[in-house]
């Protein structure tokens, strides 16, 4: 029945004059459980389904979607997509040209051990309540939050080039947060990493996170932050933990290498990019040790899948090699502009959204250092842990990123805790000042479940492989 629907949509689009069409039929299940100060604040499971139809007619794109999965509605929606394309063509500057991918037939399924939707709700709630009870015992904690969330997405993709793909992807993760308030001073700590950790895995990932073992420390550090000194305003050496390095990758490498942003076809949210076409294979973005890939094939990464939403197989490509900017994230349409084929970066956040170029897993490849040796090798500096809020300008050049907590480094040792740490600078300068990266033992693919882009905004699951890294001559403080 599902295959009949997508083929019917393709046929209807072609009969109305589409020169190309692709169809995504999606079934989604999501679950979110939140416990706040000992009370269940959210216990929600949603299911939705629908079909999105994208066409090229008269050389222009058209898109329409519907949640009504009947034959008549499918045909009506396909016809609407073609009418939109023909209307858009009256304003076109040139015809849409796609790369020569050819047809793709395939299947993909996230490898999981425990299906999160088969774990009893009571077991998940008990975990969150136990976490809350541990944090409650720490005097001075004012607010306690813990959350688990799960998604199962089943998608059928078919295109008029005879492509047909089925894939099922599981997304899984959670976070615990403790907040302490002392007078006008607030201390907040979360676990893991940048307010949570998410992967394409089953419930075994929740087991691996060991929330119960970290709850007391998180609560104690939230209280300790209210007594800590404020971050000094100096220029010094910074060591970012893996989650901090991940957010640096996200804001200063991931978004600027989205080719639609560079070409100016998608700038509504997060602006354009300084990595213009003339800089490809010429511009020094980082030091010799900086190698960054886009890799949708990493097992468990939140940006991992089998095929993107244009039917392009997941793949690994370099964005920066030995410090030189050498690649973009591309679609079938934008890749043609630079004489390439798509590297599989087109995704939509639902059946009702048109695909955009999105990050997959954008990764800083590991170096050779042990973290303890890296700290011991640093005379003075600051160690930053757990990313806070990032801010960056419309060309992705000037950034400012905060952390939940920092520790001063003196004579090769972590010493005093400091609160409200942040750092700022020019995006390529920090990567040029990267002189050490920890080895693969410290490397993890940090999941970002809410990357925003587009207008209307779409939120996307993306990942960032990172280990702690050291950067010289960085401005820290307000």
Image (tube, rainbow, N blue to C red):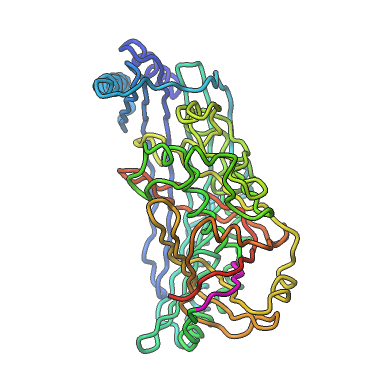
Question: Could one spot residue 73 in this view of the protein?
Answer: no
Front residue of 231/72: it is 231
Highlighted magenta segment, given as a residue range: 234-240
Residue 109 drawn at (x, y percent): 59, 37
For the residue pair 232 and 45, the one nearer the viewer reads as 232
Where residue 306 sits, quadrant-wise, is top right
Residue appearing at x 53%, y 39% in the figure: 328
Give percent across and percent down for residue 347.
46, 37
Relative height, residue 477 to residue 341 (above, below): below
Residue 382 in view, yes or no = yes
Quadrant the N terminus occupies: top left
* Residue 445 picture location, percent across and down: 60, 54
- Is the C terminus in the top left, top right, bottom left or bottom right quadrant? bottom left
- What count of labels does the image hold? 0
Instruction: Write the residue at 44% across / 80% down.
Output: 187
Q: Is residue 58 left or right of residue 385?
A: left
């Amino acid at each position: 029945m599902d295959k009949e629907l997508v083929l019917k949509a393709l046929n209807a689009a072609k009969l109305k004059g589409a020169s190309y069409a692709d169809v995504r039929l999606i079934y989604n299940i999501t679950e979110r459980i939140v416990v706040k100060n000992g009370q269940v604040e959210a216990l929600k499971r949603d299911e939705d389904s629908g079909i999105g139809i994208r066409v090229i007619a008269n050389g222009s794109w058209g898109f329409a979607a519907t949640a009504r999965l009947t034959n008549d509605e499918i045909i009506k929606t396909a016809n609407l997509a073609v009418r939109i394309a023909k209307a858009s063509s009256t304003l076109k500057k040139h015809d849409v040209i796609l790369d020569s991918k050819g047809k793709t037939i395939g299947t993909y399924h996230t490898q999981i051990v425990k299906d999160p939707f088969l774990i009893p709700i009571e077991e998940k709630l008990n975990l969150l309540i136990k976490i809350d009870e541990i944090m409650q015992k720490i005097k001075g904690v004012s607010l306690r939050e813990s959350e688990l969330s799960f998604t199962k997405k089943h998608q059928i993709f078919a295109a008029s080039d005879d492509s047909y793909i089925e894939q099922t992807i599981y997304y899984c993760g959670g976070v615990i947060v403790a907040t302490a308030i002392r007078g006008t001073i607030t201390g907040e700590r979360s676990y893991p990493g940048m307010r949570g950790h998410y992967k394409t895995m089953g419930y075994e990932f929740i087991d691996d996170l060991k929330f119960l073992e970290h709850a007391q420390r998180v609560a104690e550090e939230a209280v300790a932050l209210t007594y800590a000194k404020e971050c000094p305003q100096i220029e010094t050496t910074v060591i970012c933990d893996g989650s901090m390095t991940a957010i640096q990758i996200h804001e200063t490498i991931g978004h600027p290498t989205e080719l639609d942003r560079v070409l100016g076809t998608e700038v509504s949210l997060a602006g354009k990019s300084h990595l213009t076409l003339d800089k490809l294979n010429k511009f020094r973005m980082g030091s010799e040790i900086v190698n960054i890939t886009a890799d949708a094939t990493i097992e468990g990464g939140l940006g991992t899948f089998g095929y993107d939403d244009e039917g392009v197989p997941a793949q690994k490509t370099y964005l920066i090699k030995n410090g030189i900017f050498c690649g973009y994230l591309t679609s079938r349409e934008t890749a043609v502009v630079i004489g390439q084929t798509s590297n599989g970066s087109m995704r939509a956040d639902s059946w009702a959204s048109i695909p955009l170029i999105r990050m997959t897993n954008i990764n800083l490849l590991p170096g050779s250092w042990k973290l303890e040796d890296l700290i011991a090798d640093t005379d003075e500096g600051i160690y930053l842990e757990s990313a806070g809020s990032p801010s960056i300008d419309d060309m992705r050049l000037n950034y400012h990123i905060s952390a939940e907590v920092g520790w001063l480094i003196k004579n090769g040792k972590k010493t005093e805790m400091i609160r409200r740490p942040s750092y700022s600078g020019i995006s390529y300068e920090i990567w040029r000042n990267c002189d050490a990266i920890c080895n693969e033992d410290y490397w993890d693919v940090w999941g970002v479940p809410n990357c925003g882009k587009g207008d209307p905004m779409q939120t996307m699951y993306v990942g960032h492989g990172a280990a702690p890294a050291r950067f010289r001559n960085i401005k820290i403080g307000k």
